[in-house]
Image (tube, rainbow, N blue to C red):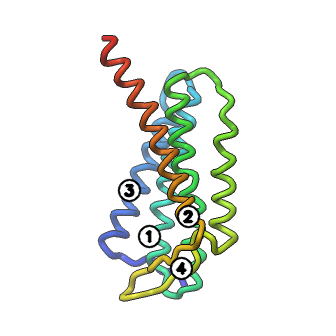
Amino acid sequence: MLVFDFHFENIILFLMGLLNTVFGILIFFKKGEKLKANEAFIWLSFTIALWAWLLASARSATDTQTALWASRILYAIATFLPYWFLRFAILFLAPRERNIVALAVPTIIFAFVALFTDLIIADVGKQAMRTIFIFGPWYIGFVAYLTIYFLIGLFIIARRYLHASLGS
């Protein structure tokens, strides 16, 4: 059963999700040119919000079966965070349309694996009102994917910032 648990961490997660939703809406309704980077940022904001709410849900689940499914959905959604961040970084660097569909392939694979198998989240346990994630054999690959995509995105943004700073 899923009942919202009003622990401090869950309240912070709920507020973080709400704040990211507001950021996404503000960018969506921003006057002026609708850039592809803005679209990627909106998707990133909404994905962060959904991730935060799902994490609070997984933590609030009262039985292990609900916690397991909430955790698998949580990790499936988490695969989209680095994708949207990297897409935003690439489009922010070069706002013209780019063919970066190939970036989605690992994202879709990891999302499918997270949602429908026990290779990333093998199981969950409940201990002292906490959900304990038990990771599967693909978890290290999942972490590597997240890390690589985020680092590439950060590198792209840092490079753009440094070029802009040194050029001015």
Q: Earlier in the sequence, mark 1 or mark 4?
A: 1
Q: Quadrant of the C terminus?
A: top left
Q: Which mark is residue 75?
A: 2
At x 57% / y 78%, what residue is drawn? 68
At x 45% / y 42%, what residue is drawn? 151
Q: Nearer the viewer, residue 2 or 133?
A: 133
Q: Amino acid at mark 2?
A: Tyr
Q: Is residue 126 above or below residue 14?
A: below
Badge 3 vs badge 4, beta-carbon distance below 8 Å: no
Q: Earlier in the sequence, mark 3 or mark 1?
A: 3
The residue pinned by badge 3 equals 16
What SS does tag 3 mark? helix
Cα separation, mark 3 vs mark 4, equals 21 Å
Q: Which mark is residue 67?
A: 4
Any part of residue 70 in sight: no
Pointer 4 local density, CA inside 10 Å: few below 14, some 14–19, many at least 20? many
Badge 1 vs badge 4, beta-carbon distance below 8 Å: no
Q: Quadrant of residue 17?
A: bottom left
Q: Earlier in the sequence, mark 1 or mark 2?
A: 1
What SS does tag 1 mark? helix
Q: Earlier in the sequence, mark 2 or mark 4?
A: 4
Badge 2 vs badge 4, beta-carbon distance below 8 Å: no
The percent coordinates of residue 53 (x first, y second) are 47, 64
Tell us which disc is closer to us: 2 or 4: 2
The percent coordinates of residue 166 (x first, y second) are 31, 15
Cα separation, mark 1 vs mark 4, equals 10 Å
Cα separation, mark 2 vs mark 4, equals 12 Å
Any part of residue 37 in sight: yes
Q: Nearer the viewer, residue 111 or 20?
A: 111
Q: Which mark is residue 56?
A: 1
